[in-house]
Image: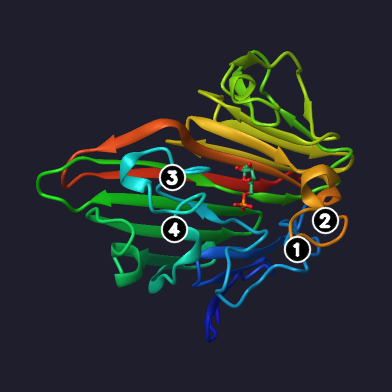
Amino acid sequence: MPVQRLDNRVVLIHPKGATAELLLYGATVISWKAGSRANSEPAERLFLSSKALLDGSKAVRGGIPIVFPCFGPPTHPEHSRLSQHGFARSESWELDSTVTDNDDGVSVRLTLGPTPSIIAKYNRSFHLAYVVTLQEHQLSTDLHVTNTSTSDGLEFQALFHNYVLAPADEVLVYPLQNIMYYDKTEATEEGRNKPKVESRSNVDVRKFTDSVYEDASQKYEVMWPGEGVQIRTSGLKDVVIWNPQSEAGSKMADMEDGGWKKFVCVEPGCVRGFTNIEPGKTWVGQQVLSVVLM
Ligand code: TA6
């Protein structure tokens, strides 16, 4: 059975053994298991804090939370009543359909529209569709944002907040050299708003890192000795690299002790400025995560 619907979650099972698991809450992928070589045993590729709340009471600490319509603390007037990273990751989505189910892969479509709890804090006309596709060594996530208004434009930010399971003190992310970025670990607002240029060919997260790269390559290697994950994107011009290390991680109630040593967040999105879609139009942001075959 390639798609199993359990009470509050969906499990995708590939004929060759890979699996993915999503909560309907936030349409959050909480597990992706895939082999790193043909016919090798599938292994977990995403970090999920053992203290993550999976009961719908709080956005999940791990997996792939969806950030929409705002990234970080809201700055747009239409988002003023929203919490950090918007509402998409903390609303219950509908399982709409199984999109593909064949030997190559299986995919499901989830949807979210203006529910009463959303309308109470965000009164824009929109429809979200999220398609998750599991193949033998790949996981794809596509976010479709439709402006259902007949008259007004829709301005938003969107991002896939990927918690890639990796040894934080060894993992390297590239290519980011010569890309402009904003360092959110700077102590002052002036420092956080001052653009820097990445000088490193390989970015590490051995110290507290929270960098927002603008207009990056849309293709990222997340590598550590013997393993890695490639991320290929379209429609997602920016990328955030985050690891709280103990400095920030130890202050998070839902971050397991030392959890910050087990992941790097590599988060493709459109987060510098706002994307604007015209009435009736749809924007699509896609990422493909691939296990590097060693
Ligand atoms: O993507 C990096 C970031 O914006 C960090 O600044 C940190 O806040 C992280 O997201 C996690 O945010 P959350 O709201 O999930 O605790």
Q: Which residue is mark 3?
A: 70
Is 25 on the left-hand or right-hand side of 122?
right
Q: Is residue 107 visible?
A: no
Q: Which residue is mark 2?
A: 259
Q: Earlier in the sequence, mark 2 or mark 4?
A: 4
Q: Mark 3: is the Cβ under 8 angstroms from ligand 1?
A: no
Q: Earlier in the sequence, mark 1 or mark 3?
A: 1
The label on residue 211 is none
Comparing 205 with 173, the one in front is 205
Comparing 284 with 2, the one in front is 284
Q: Amino acid at mark 3?
A: Cys
Q: Residue furthest front?
A: 188
Q: Earlier in the sequence, mark 1 or mark 4?
A: 1
Is label 1 in a helix, a strand or a loop?
loop
- Marks 1 and 4: which is nearer the front? 4
Q: Amino acid at mark 4?
A: Phe
Q: Are marks 1 and 4 in contact (CB under 8 Å)?
A: no
**Residue 164, image x, y percentages:** 71, 49
Q: Which residue is mark 1?
A: 49
